[in-house]
């Protein structure tokens, strides 16, 4: 007995080929059109913030950037992973708590360290000096 899966149902994409009798030469899913329009608006806004003047070539490069970014985004989207789920996953990844890599405290400071003019003798030299020194004089 052979069990058939429901993969054939999901192989059919919701694709808009264009108006009747004037179809586009490329296939694009509905979600790609929506993402592309939003990305195009964002790319144009970024161009204006970078003080790139509005013109033919700047708009053409914005269109090329939009196509590349849209293809990148829609490559991650399918029927098992819709746009809303990918966006929610991205937001969760962005706001998740991270392990702290910085050490606690602050910069090291020498303000609590006492500094003397002479260097203390090593322990074995101090003991020799104490053994050979005369007894203290009492007055």
Image (cartoon, rainbow, N blue to C red):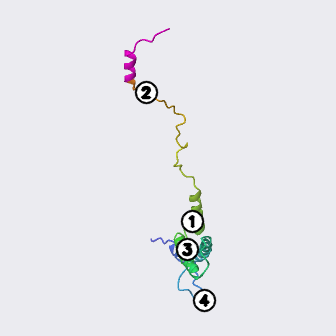
x then y, percent, for residue 19: 61, 87
Query: Foreground mark, 1 or 4?
Result: 1
Q: CA distance from mark 2 to mark 4?
A: 97 Å
Tag 4 or tag 1, which sits nearer the N-term?
4
The image position of residue 77, as x and y in percent, is 54, 70
SS at circle 1? helix
Q: Position of residue 42 (x, y in %)?
A: 61, 72
Q: Which mark is residue 86?
A: 1
Residue hosting label 3:
70
**CA–CA distance between discs 4 and 3?**
25 Å
Residue 83's place in the image compared with 58, above or below, is: above
Distance CA(mark 1)–CA(mark 2): 67 Å
For the residues labelled 3 and 2, say whether their Cβ atoms are less than 8 Å apart: no
Which residues are the magenta region? 124-139
Mark 1, Cα crowd under 10 Å, few <14 / some 14-19 / many 20+, is some
Q: Which mark is residue 20?
A: 4
Q: CA distance from mark 1 to mark 4?
A: 33 Å
User: Which is more toward the observer, 96 or 6?
Assistant: 96
């Amino acid at each position: 007995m052979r069990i058939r899966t429901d993969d054939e149902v999901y192989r059919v994409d919701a694709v808009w080929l264009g108006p009747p009798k004037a179809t586009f030469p490329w296939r694009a899913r509905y979600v790609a059109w929506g993402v592309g329009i939003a990305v195009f608006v964002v790319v144009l806004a970024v161009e204006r913030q970078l003080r790139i003047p509005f013109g033919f070539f700047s708009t053409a490069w914005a269109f090329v950037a939009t196509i590349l970014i849209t293809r990148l985004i829609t490559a991650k989207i399918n029927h098992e992973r819709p746009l809303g789920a990918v966006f929610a996953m991205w937001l969760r990844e962005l706001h998740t708590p991270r392990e702290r890599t910085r050490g606690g405290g602050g910069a090291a400071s020498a303000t609590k360290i006492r500094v003397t003019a002479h260097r203390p003798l090593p322990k074995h030299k101090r003991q020799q000096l104490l053994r050979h020194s005369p007894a203290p004089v009492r007055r």
